[in-house]
Amino acid sequence: MNSMRLLYAVYALALVLLVIVVPLMTHGGGSSAVKGWTALVDPGPLSFQHASLKADCETCHTPHKGAEPVKCIACHVGTDFGTKASTRFHANAKQCTTCHVEHDGGASLTRMDHLALLDPKLWQGPTVTADARPMSTPSKTSNALSCASCHAARDPHQGLFGKDCKSCHTLTDWKIAEFRHPSVNSRQCAECHKAPPSHLMMHFEMVSQRVAKERASVNQCVACHTTDSWNNIRKVGWYDHH
């Protein structure tokens, strides 16, 4: 009986050390205050980009609070998120870990959660449509998002289909299963495709027409191009010059 009591006492003491003493020591002296304890709470390997921070938890984490945005900004303050429209929303983000995940070896460092853009506690900016702004609680559906506010800079439709991306696309897959490209012999390419800048200069006559061996006008795309790739020139083959 006495041995069992002694064993319980040892367990109780170990529990006190683990639950009270270790947190107090690490709170004051950092993760290195108690050697080896981080191995007990390590949730997994860091990504390659953050692997050098493995031995210094405080670089990203604050005791009793976890990973805080201020820690992320301290390292990424020099990153220019404002140049590209697709990353510009980061300037108004309030919580990085909503989309950026660590401790899984970098398998999914970024998990884009579009609906997080509708939560004012995490972010508030122009990706919310004008119709959703007056609402006290933003709509929790993709219909409240203004896709063009982030994706306009890389619009493959070049503005020809307007800004209502949701009429064709979804957040989970931009590909449209029902879409079928017109025949390779279709002569209406210019209705959807705009000519590149080179086709609006002398370069078109001096180089493009000579390579394709055609005197077609700029809006007669089918005379030189195929629909599998713009660089696949009819009667010439692959030609990557522009």
Image (cartoon, grey):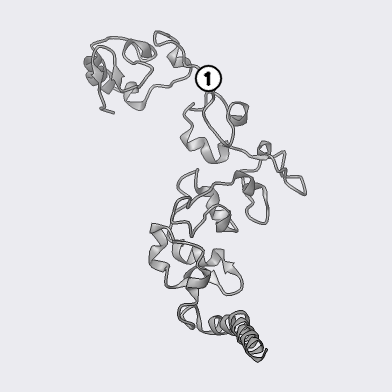
- Seen at 65% across and 86% down, the residue is 4
Q: Where on the picture, by quarter, is residue 129?
A: top right
- Seen at 44% across and 20% down, the residue is 193
Residue 65 visible in rendering: yes
Residue 58 visible in rendering: no
Which residue lies under the disc numbered 1? 179
Extreme right residue here? Answer: 136
Using the image as rendered, state which of residue 37 and residue 73 is in the foreground.
Answer: 37
- Element assignment for label 1: loop
Disc 1 residue type (three-letter): Phe
- Binning the other alpha carbons within 10 Å of mark 1 as few (below 14), some (14 to 19) or many (20 upward) gives few
In x, y percent, where is residue 128?
Answer: 65, 43
Q: Count how many numbered circles sit on residues in the image.
A: 1
Which quarter of the figure is the N terminus placed in?
bottom right
Q: Position of 154 compared to 172: left or right?
A: left
- Seen at 48% across and 62% down, the residue is 44
Q: Position of 149 compared to 8: left or right?
A: left
Q: Tell me if residue 123 comes above or below residue 51 in the rendering.
A: above
Q: Position of 1 compared to 165: left or right?
A: right
Q: Where on the picture, by quarter, is residue 27?
A: bottom right
In x, y percent, where is residue 84?
Answer: 46, 45
Q: Tell me if residue 203 comes above or below residue 147 in the rendering.
A: above
In x, y percent, where is residue 39?
Answer: 47, 72
Q: Tell me if residue 242 comes above or below residue 73 in the rendering.
A: above
